[in-house]
């Protein structure tokens, strides 16, 4: 019987360790998205990009705070409860990043030049 107790206790501590490692690895990614959406809000003038940036910063900040829970005390929440939240977060941030990239490049195409105007200048 003592072998079973040791195995269960060891599995619990390994799961706590894995949860804490994943949380600590996710914190820099959350900080990256917070900074990326903050700079997008500051430098891109499209209304859609600004709205997506505000929503993105809000979601990334919320996930950053939630990620601090398993990073500081992994016994409070397990990886099984934490992983689906991270998967949803990744999909949302991927979508928001694509929308912001399209918005940033939408009006940054080279200016169309009128050939007649150029000929008149020469």
Image: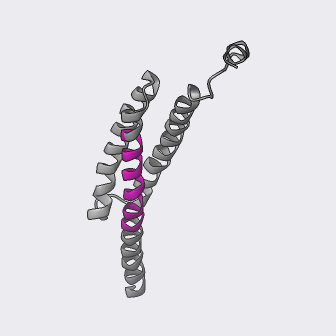
Question: What residue is at 42 percent from the left and 75 percent from the top?
Answer: 11
**Camera-nearest residue between 114 and 39:** 114
Quadrant in the rendering for residue 9: bottom left
**Camera-nearest residue between 115 and 47:** 115
Q: Position of residue 69 (x, y in %)?
A: 28, 57
Which quarter of the rendered picture does the C terminus lie within?
A: top right
Question: What residue is at 42 percent from the left and 26 percent from the top?
Answer: 45
Q: Is residue 12 above or below residue 24?
A: below
Q: Position of residue 23 (x, y in %)?
A: 38, 61
Question: What residue is at 38 percent from the left and 72 percent from the top?
Answer: 17
Q: How many marks?
A: 0
Quadrant in the rendering for residue 106: top right
**Camera-nearest residue between 56 and 17:** 56
- Residue 43 on the magenta segment: no
Q: Start and end of the magenta stretch?
A: 20-38
Residue 42 visible here: yes
Examine the residues drawn in magenta and state their main secondary structure.
helix
Which residue is farthest front?
Answer: 122
Q: Position of residue 10 (x, y in %)?
A: 39, 79
**Camera-nearest residue between 65 and 98:** 98
Question: What residue is at 32 percent from the left and 43 percent from the top?
Answer: 62
């Amino acid at each position: 019987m003592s072998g079973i107790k040791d195995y269960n206790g060891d599995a619990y501590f390994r799961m706590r360790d894995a949860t804490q490692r994943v949380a600590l690895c996710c914190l820099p990614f959350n900080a990256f998205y917070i900074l990326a959406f903050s700079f997008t809000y500051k430098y891109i003038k499209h209304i859609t990009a600004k709205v997506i940036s505000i929503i993105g910063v809000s979601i990334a900040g919320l996930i950053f705070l939630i990620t601090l829970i398993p990073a500081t005390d992994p016994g409070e929440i397990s990886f099984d409860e934490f992983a689906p939240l991270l998967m949803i977060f990744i999909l949302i941030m991927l979508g928001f990043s694509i929308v912001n990239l399209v918005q940033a490049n939408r009006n940054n195409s080279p200016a169309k030049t009128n050939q007649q105007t150029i000929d008149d200048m020469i």
